[in-house]
Amino acid sequence: MTVAGLIKAAAMLLAAGILGNWFLSEVKQAKIEKKPWYTPYLSVPGLLILLALSLPVIAWLVQK
């Protein structure tokens, strides 16, 4: 693996960590405020996570 590949991998891991912590803070805030379980998924980090998880399905649908 090249240095550029390592930098890219580190950047993706850092971004995933930041997004994960952001989503976790939304989950904690929703629990404190006694909001419904789905509230964190409707926030910005939740929608980004759902989009990232649905990208393979979207790519598969576009290829067909």
Image (cartoon, rainbow, N blue to C red):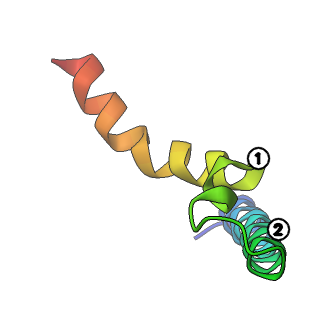
Q: Which residue is drawn at 52% across and 49% down?
A: 50
Q: In which quarter of the image is the N terminus?
A: bottom right
Amino acid marked by disc 2: Trp
Q: Is residue 43 left or right of residue 22?
A: left
Residue labelled with disc 1: 44
In the rendered structure, which disc, 1 or 2, sits on the residue that comes first in sequence?
A: 2
Q: In which quarter of the image is the C terminus?
A: top left
Residue at the spot of label 2: 22
- Where's residue 10, x and y in %? 75, 71
Query: Looking at this rendering, what residue extends furthest in the left direction?
Result: 64
Q: Where is residue 33 in the image (x, y as percent from the top left)?
A: 83, 73
* Tag of residue 31: none
Instruction: Looking at the picture, tell me which residue is in the foreground, 12 or 42.
Output: 42
Task: Give whichever of 36, 5 is nearer the camera.
Answer: 36
Q: State left or right for residue 61 relative to residue 5.
A: left
Write down the quadrant of residue 7 in the picture.
bottom right
Q: Residue at x 57, y 59 (%)?
A: 38
| For residue 25, above or below residue 35 | below
Residue 58 at what x, y percent from top left?
A: 35, 30
What's the amino acid at mark 1? Val
Could you say which quadrant of the image residue 14 lies in? bottom right
Left or right: 63 with respect to 54? left
Q: Is mark 1 on a helix, strand or loop?
A: helix
C-alpha separation, residue under disc 1 versus residue under disc 2: 9 Å
Residue shown at the point (45%, 52%) measured from the top left: 53
Q: Quadrant of residue 2?
A: bottom right
Residue farthest to the front, as pictured: 34
Q: How crowded is mark 1: few (under 14 residues within 10 Å), some or many (20 or more)?
A: some
Is the Cβ of the residue at disc 1 closer than 8 Å to that at disc 2? yes
SS class of the residue under badge 2? helix
Given residues 9 and 5, the one toward you in this image is: 9
Q: Which of 17 and 30 is in front in this view?
A: 30
